[in-house]
Image: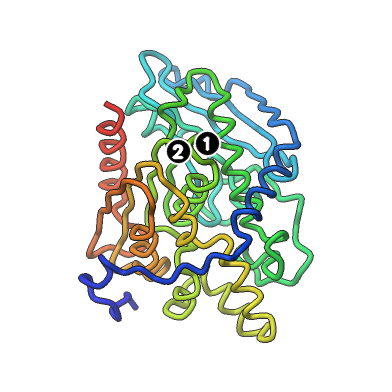
Amino acid sequence: MPEFDLPLEQLTTYLPDRREPQDWQAFWDDTLAETRKHDLSVETHSAAAYLPGVATQDVSFAGFGGHRVNAWHLRPAAGDVQGTVVQFLGYGDGRGTPLDWLAWPAAGFATLVMDTRGQGARARRAGSTGDPAGSASPYVEGFLTQGILDPRDYFYRRVFTDAVRAVETALALDGTDPERLAVAGASQGGAIALAATALAGDLVRAAIIGVPFLANVRRAVRITEERPYYELIAFLGTHRADAETALRTMDYVDGITMAAHATAPAKFSVALMDTICPPSGGFGVHNHYAGPKQLDVYPYNNHEGGEADEQVASIRWLQDLWR
């Protein structure tokens, strides 16, 4: 069911409570400091020679724990590059092939497409990055509850750290203008892009965040039974004594808090009939966001959001921002 309990006029001003743990900043500062003890160790190899109009590299770098993370780097083979977009992926998706990521280079931008560790085996695009860390606690099949009983063991601690390292990797690649580096993603990718904006500080100069996952999680699990949130609902329903412990872990990654720590210009999008990532989460993240922002609303769309229209709007927004 679409989220009908909050009318649009309330959603546009909806400001849910921010449940920021007292040690949130120290937690993420320590996490990044620990990861930065490992050399970024960027490796690049030429790829996709069959695309003469696009310079393509197969890239890897050291993410959380020094684990190797794979990515594609594509940029126009000729002419000026307008900027670089670090692209993050939806739940279960993998980096696929360079053919999947031609829109940004065709519009004049470079893009670094980061694989999400452990994913890319049940969506349409294949992944190539494992997750050596695993988890020390039980979890529901999927990724949302892996390590959920300890924030330091949690899956998204690793993923969000990988995202910051992806931003640092993009800056280390030839042709990247540090004044024109953006992050982008939808659904899980939107959550990762938002986290990268909050945690990488002024390294990120613009953010494109579509129908975001991990936004106002404590509300989301009360109003949707769709996956991936169903994984968390199932965990809370079976590990009853640990429910608050699990939800407290989610507070460390919730987009509501991430938004309050992010200041780069941002473009958000929300779909009002979204049954997977409820629109109240998207509005809540947008309304808590600390930097300049724009919001596009798709009244009659589910989790697909604006699809091609949203991609065009994002390209034009970034072109106008950096013109």
What residue is shown with label 1?
A: 97
Q: Amino acid at mark 2?
A: Asp
Left or right: 239 with respect to 76? right
Distance CA(mark 1)–CA(mark 2): 6 Å
The local crowd at label 1, few if under 14, some if 14 to 19, many if 20 or more residues have their Cα within 10 Å, is few
Residue 218 drawn at (x, y percent): 50, 74
Nearer to the camera, 201 or 269: 201
59 vs 263: above or below: above
Residue 199 drawn at (x, y percent): 54, 46
Q: Residue at x 38, y 54 (%)?
A: 289
Left or right: 136 with respect to 164? right
What residue is shown with label 2?
A: 100
Image quarter where the C terminus lies is top left
Image quarter where the N terminus lies is bottom left
For the residues bearing labels 1 and 2, Cβ distance under 8 angstroms:
yes
Q: Residue at x 27, y 49 (%)?
A: 294
